[in-house]
Amino acid sequence: MSSAPPPLDPSIAPPGTRTFRDAGGIPADQWHADQNGETLVPTHCCFCGVQCGMYLRVDRAGKVFGVEPRNHDINRMRLCPKGINAYQQVNHPDRLTAPLLRRSRDEPFREASWEEALDFTVAEIRRIQAAHGNDAFGLLGGASLFSEKTYLVGKFGRVALKTRHVDYNGRLCMVSAAGANKLAFGIDRAGNPFSDILLSDCLLIAGSNVGECFPVMTQYLWGARDRGASLIVIDPRETAIARTADIHVALKPGTDAAFFNAVLNVVIQENLVDKEFVAAHTTGWDEVRASVADCTPEVAADICGIPAHQVVQVARAFAGADRAMAWHARGIEHHSQGVENCLTVINLCTATGNLGKPGAGYGTITGQGNGQGGREHGQKSDLLPGGRSIANPEHRRQICEIWGIEETELPPAGTSMMEMVWQMQRQEIRGLIGICNNPFVSLPNYATVKSGYDTLEFHAQFDFFLSETAANAHVVFPVTTWAEDEGVMANAEARVVKHNKAQEPPAGVRTDTWVMCQLAQRLGVADKFSYAGSREVFDELRIASAGTVNDYYGITYERLEETGGIAWPCPSTDHPGTPRLFEGGRTAHPDGKIHMQAVEWHPPMDPYDEEHPMSLTTGRTVAHFLSGNQTRRLGALVEQTPRPWVEVHPSHGFRNGDPVRVVTRRGSEVFPALVTEAIRPDTVFIPYHWPVPTAANALTIDALDPRSKIPEYKVCACRIEAAERIDEVPAPPAPPGHQAYPATQVSRTDPLPPTSPQGRGTAERS
Amino acid sequence: MMGRTIFIDPGRCIGCQACVSACRECDSHRGKSMIHLDYPDEGHSVASLPTVCMHCEDPVAPCAEVCPADAILVTADGVVQQADTTRCIGCANCVNACPFGVPKIDLQAKLQLKCNLCYDRTAYGLAPMCATVCPTGALFYGTVEELRAERPGVQVADSFTFGDVVVSTGVAMVVPADKVQWPVPGGLPIVEVNGKDVTR
Ligand code: SF4
Ligand code: SF4
């Protein structure tokens, strides 16, 4: 028996830190982890919008070396493979540990001191802004940052860089849903917590591959189905959850609005409208009703390429259920009609009275961990903290007061992420700082993106790995991972959760907050950026959000640690938070009504023709996250999904593994075929996590939704042809700066005591 | 019949391989996963099927029975252990004997590797890593009563036919209601969703 573990040092251990013994109810001295002096730091997964609770295992030397499932309300111990392997990033051999610098893109990077890298960056900012104006410098943030940092990105851009061009990569995530929510409800978040799913009788999932993109959410779907709920899935592919759905509608990409209009048409025809609810709580119903009058099941069947009876089936199942819920994700949002697609779903929920009740409602499933929180506090080009509009004089005044600047100093709204790339091409933007984003993989139409970034006179990136985009920069600042700092994220339910610090960052690495404050200091606004750490930023954010729709004022770090998460709005420190919106049919609009909006379907932006007769659609795989800068470096995940492929229907005559060239108006690339009946014959699918020459986004179109400015990733015209030789299929290039895959649990400092029963003498021979 | 054990419910499996990654992380396997994820209907559907050690009860542990080095032990609670590294000679007899295709051989180390129901966890009341993390509950750890409380009316089978041979196992599988009366064909995907057989 070993000696007891050393006691936790309360000054460094985050609240809730446990030993293994506490976590599992395991008798003392029988669990080797305790004997190793190992501690479990409670935190959340850094990846998707589910934000699963987990413990990071920290060894006696204070290093993260493993993960242990955590019984948090959101995930109840469950994790997906990304969550399980996430800890391997923390002490990964590819980590950047010194600033990288070069004065021109022709030179290789060299390691530089922090002083030199910061001074050079500030000199370049000043040079560009003096010659071309403040707006010639842009700032692009990221939705994987804690909310404190996204707040600071917005403030840093407007107050230190004094530029209007601030945006973030959440622009590629759920902004269409946000736009629709704002229009219909006056508030931008999902209406219900995940736990409401368990109470639903009919679940409609539109454009979301829940099984692969939000795996841990599937437990809620199954919980409802165990009670007898029916499941409707709208998706061009038969995904893992579509496979067992009661109704799977495999519609043609880009036709969602027509489908949902037709469903509403049937709901009206069959007298399934909740007339009382509509009369009491909505505006715009007459226009909506008129707008769907011509969209019969037959019309939709023709547009969507589905049997007409499915429209009727869906209408009856959804409107006929006691409590029905609709959830959607990028599949209907990544379109030039993204906002409108979401509005048609809202119209359906509203017309059937399915809003604001346990088991009945509406939600969008956030892709990035902080896709929700990432835009709430001013990182988006048109928003100020608390979701305030940058165009609203009263909102501007309030924020200027908190920031201590004159209203005339606060720039107006800027443009969106993709538009900023076009501005780079036109040299309207000449310098850029990117914070934890990787547009070289994640933006559509790679050729345009590359030419935009190549035109920049100065480009700096913050990241902890050298992403494809950072590899193009002049300066790269090595920053912390999520396990080396504390902060909050808001998940897909708008539940604010706290991430804790599990280890000290490696020598040479700084927090994003520190880097922004250092730059601000050198830009002459030190007084407005003197934060000791996340907590001080959070307290300012709370005040900046007070009284707004996105009210965080009542949320404190202490409360988050006690409760495991609080859904905003939470206006006071004794307020329990608001997991469910629209109770009693009341929205955040001043009149309290749901503003229904008529939508007319229009075809996707990239027209089909003889050369390009098919649809290309893109999406995620379960093993990789977004641009893959993190997950393509984790051996287990690379082994699970080493490369992209193109999914094609057997009717095209390919066999598995055949090289298939996919051609769009932007370019062509060759992928191995995955031949499957699980996709429509007129559609192909490519997962998008890899860079060129294996990048789906070398092919996708940079058309944007006019309101949300989200790119139309989910549909463009293409053709497929047989590539001649198998060796034409390129392998994905290694991520920049890749050294080695971390081994599983190699950093354990002590050898394990025997755990197998033969070591305990309890075994019987068979 | 079964006490606390793993129940496999292939109808729920989304093929995410969280179980595979989790198995790699557990302290008894450290870096090597002992879970097989099969895609039984490839080309038609995305169906997937996790296989963990079934901990055969009758005949008890065919892998152990054929082991010439007597390296595979079965504990009193019916858990078939990974081969004892001090005895295993890496001959792969166990691989050939297992009707479910579970044991693997680490060719470099010349040692057998197999699922031991996370004995380091289950012996102390924790669920195995795979069943703990499985996002869908396709792998469930508990008693059949606990399973039924969560999934009312669920039917499970713990005997499987391989030709004329019937193997009863310590790990059970969720099966369609009409198949539970008989030993279920071993090695075939049986996919149950809400009591219905949706196997193609
Ligand atoms: S990626 Fe999402 S589902 Fe997977 S563990 Fe992380 S938060 Fe959970
Ligand atoms: S973790 Fe569960 S759902 Fe995922 S592959 Fe394994 S058994 Fe299937």
Image (spheres, helix red, strand yellow):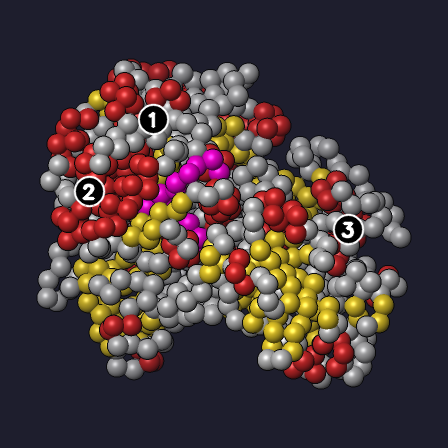
In front here: B130 or A374?
B130
Answer with mark 2 or mark 1, whichever residue precedes in sequence.
1
Give amino acid for label 3: Tyr
Give amino acid for label 2: Ala
Residue A368 placement (x, y as % from top left): 42, 44
Per the rendering, the mark at residue B124 is 3
Kindly identify which chain the residue marked by label 3 belongs to.
B
Q: How many marks?
A: 3
The answer to whether residue A8 is above or below residue B132 is above
In front here: A388 or A121?
A388
Distance from Cα at disc 3 to Cα at disc 1: 47 Å
The answer to whether residue A587 is above or below residue A693 is above
Magenta extent: A198-212
Residue pointed to by mark 1: A187
Residue pointed to by mark 2: A262
Q: Nearer the viewer, mark 3 or mark 2?
A: 2
The residue positioned 25% from the left and 30% from the top of the image is A273
Give the secondary structure at mark 1: loop
